[in-house]
Each structure stands twice: as structure tokens, then as C-alpha cells.
Amino acid sequence: AAPPRLYQICGRLVPWLAAAGIIALATGWVRGFGFAPADYQQGESYRIMYLHVPAAIWSMGIYAAMAVAAFTGLVWQMKMASLAVAAMAPVGAVYTFIALVTGAAWGKPMWGTWWVWDARLTSELVLLFLYAGVIALWHAFDDRKMAGRAAGILVLVGVVNLPVIHYSVEWWNTLHQGSTRMQQSIDPAMRSPLRWAIAGFLLLFMTLALMRMRNLILLMEKRRPWVSELILKRGHR
């Protein structure tokens, strides 16, 4: 889509996505933190799962979405695809940071330590560094085309880390528990709030990414007449 059209579409979607995300997160967290039963092994400490699992899932999901956008931008030279990479990266970095911090807090009572150089934890930390690298490359060049190309190449190179994160608990003998099997091993009273939280994190990501996308479009198009007209319209309100 053309930048003005995409700017308008993002603006229309943001309020709906934000409202849906708030509802989903509130539903998941109220039910998960307030009403789900205690775990027979972990007691109350497992409840951090409602933060950790959604953040961990979407830390990888966001990077995968960035890889698709980066590939599109590099192959078909689409400026909006490169902007999408830049819009998603900070949200992905925050989600990865949340996953690492909550994972450390969850691991302390389970493992007796905040951190181990476990395959899953280490590869998730590498993911955070990849996000930081993408953000740094985007801001390292004044030429937006060059910045988008450099960031896109790093994103595609870093894709190899995703299967390492996902399958690390199967490939190596790790302390980290296996992937959460929402359909089978979790009590339904715990599983339903988790699904709501996962959906809420996705909707929150979409909201924040689209908000940032709008800002990046304005920065890229700041010398175009439609941006000047938009500023004038807002100034007259």
C-alpha cells in the first residue's frame, strides 16, 4: 500500500486491536493469577507462566514475522517491508527481555539459581542480541534504504537461531522444561487463561507495532505534501 493509505489503515486498526488486547490480557491474567488452581509440584510459583510463556512464544513469532518482512523488502525492494522490520524490532526486544527476566524468576525456586548457561536460555539471550543488532543497524545509517538492507540481512542471518531455541530442549540435555503442550498436559483451568494471555500478547504486539509503523511512515514521508496537510489538520482541531 502507498504510505498515506497504510498510515490510515494502521490508525484505524490500532484502537480495535488495543481494546481486544486489553480484554484478552485482563481475562487471562485475572483468571490465571486469581482463580487458576495451584500446581501440585510448583505451588503458586508457576503463575509467572502467564507472563513468561506468551512473551517467549512471541519473542520468536515476532522475529519470524520480521524475517518474512525482511525477505520481502530485500527481494522486491519494498520500503514499507523494511519499515515493518524497524517497527517490530523494539517490541520483539522487549518481549524477549520479559521472557528472560521472568524465566530467571521462575527458574530460581525450581533450579536454585537465577541463571545457567542452558541451551534454551543462551539461545534466547542470543535472540535479544539479534534484536538489539537490528535496532542498532537501523539507526546507524542516514540512508533509510541502506539501513533497511543492513537490518534485513541481519534478520535473515539470525533466523537460524529460531529452531535452536525451539528444539534445544530436545536436542540437548537441558534444565529447561520441555515446550508447553497446551492441548494435553496442562489442567484446563490453567490452560484457558494461558491461551487468553498468549492472544493478548499478540494483540498488544500488533497494536504497538502499528503505532510505531505510523511514526516511521511520518518520518520517512515528512517532506511530502500529505504529511504537511495532516499536521495542518491536526493543528486546527
Image: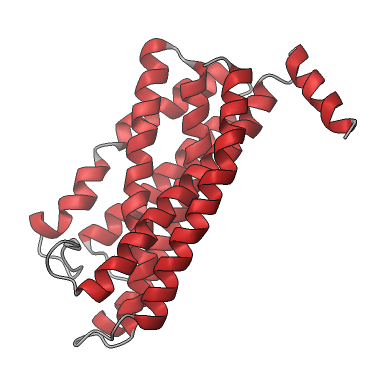
- Camera-side residue: 139 or 190? 190
* Left or right: 103 as drawn, with respect to 184: right
- Image x and y of residue 179, in percent: 18, 61
Q: Image point 36% across, 35% down: which residue?
A: 65
Who's the residue at 12% across and 65% down the image? 184
Residue 128 image offset from top left, x and y in percent: 41, 50
Quadrant of the rendered structure where residue 35 is? Answer: bottom left
Out of 39 and 106, give the one closest to the viewer: 39
Number of numbered discs on residues: 0
Q: Is residue 65 above or below residue 129?
A: above
Q: Is residue 226 left or right of residue 48?
A: right
- Compare residues 1 and 113 and report the one nearer the observer: 1
Instruction: Please identify the residue farthest to the right as the structure is shown.
Output: 236
| Quarter of the figure with the C terminus | top right
Residue 132 visible in the picture? no
Q: Is residue 9 left or right of residue 102?
A: right
Residue at coordinates 48% horizontally, 40% vertically from top-left?
Answer: 89
Residue 164 in view (yes/no): yes
Q: Give above or below for 73 relative to 110.
A: above
Q: Is residue 84 above or below residue 2?
A: below
Q: How is the image coloured?
A: secondary structure
Image location (x, y in percent) of residue 5: 59, 19
The location of residue 30, given as percent across then percent down, is 44, 74
Tell me which corner region of the image, top left, top right, bottom left or bottom right, holds residue 216.
top right
Residue drawn 68% across the image and 19% down it: 221
